[in-house]
Image (cartoon, rainbow, N blue to C red):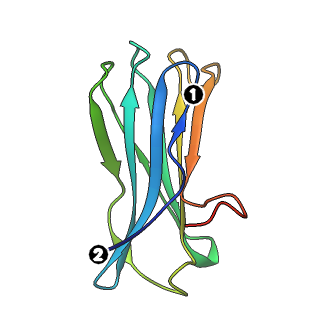
């Protein structure tokens, strides 16, 4: 199994996450590792973006406690170059979807010059 992960990020509100693109045996999927120390239920969405505009989106449901957890999209057949897929996890705060603040966005890509 191979993983390509972005940096571990921490939001001032207490959300921590790291998002990865996973590949194994001709399949690709997105996984995010998170910790929710906000004390509130969040609205996380994990998206796998593949070549040709293909996307897989999953609404995760982490509990409102400070335990680490994971969320991952279904596996899809790999296509394109090995680095052609990216993943993004967005953690929205409590409240109506159209009014909830975005607390953290964590992607599978590192900033240029960050190294691996």
Residue 76 point in image, percent of width and height: 37, 73
Report which residue position mark 1 lands on: 11
Count of numbered circles on the image: 2
Q: Which residue is drawn at 54% across and 87% down?
A: 80
Residue drawn at (57%, 27%) of the image:
11
Q: Residue 29's x, y, as percent?
A: 38, 66
Q: Where is the C terminus found, in terms of image quarters?
A: bottom right
**Are the residues tagged 1 and 2 within 8 Å (C-beta)?**
no
Residue 30 percent location from the top left of the image = 41, 60
Name the foreground residue: 14 vs 91: 14
Label of residue 1 in the image: 2
Binning the other alpha carbons within 10 Å of mark 2 as few (below 14), some (14 to 19) or many (20 upward) gives few
Residue 103: image quadrant is: top right
> Is 18 positioned to the left or the right of 114 in the image?
left
Question: Which class describes the residues within 10 Å of circle 1: few (<14), some (14-19), or many (20+)?
Answer: few
- The one nearer the camera, 20 or 96, is 20
Q: Position of residue 101 (x, y in %)?
A: 63, 22
Image quadrant assignment for residue 109: bottom right
Residue under the image location 48 percent in, 27 percent down: 15
On screen, residue 84 above or below 42: below
Q: Cα distance, mark 1 to mark 2?
A: 29 Å
Q: Earlier in the sequence, mark 1 or mark 2?
A: 2
């Amino acid at each position: 199994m191979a993983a390509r992960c972005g940096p571990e990020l921490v939001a001032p509100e207490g959300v921590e996450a790291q998002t990865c693109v996973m590949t194994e045996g001709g399949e690709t999927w997105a996984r995010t590792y998170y910790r929710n120390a906000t004390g509130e239920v969040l609205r996380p969405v994990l998206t796998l973006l593949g070549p040709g505009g293909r996307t897989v989106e999953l609404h995760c449901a982490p509990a409102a406690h400070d335990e680490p957890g994971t969320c991952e999209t279904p596996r899809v057949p790999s296509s394109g170059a090995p680095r052609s897929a990216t993943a993004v996890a967005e953690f929205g705060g409590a409240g109506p979807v159209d009014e909830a603040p975005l607390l953290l966005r964590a992607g599978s890509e590192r900033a240029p010059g960050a190294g691996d």
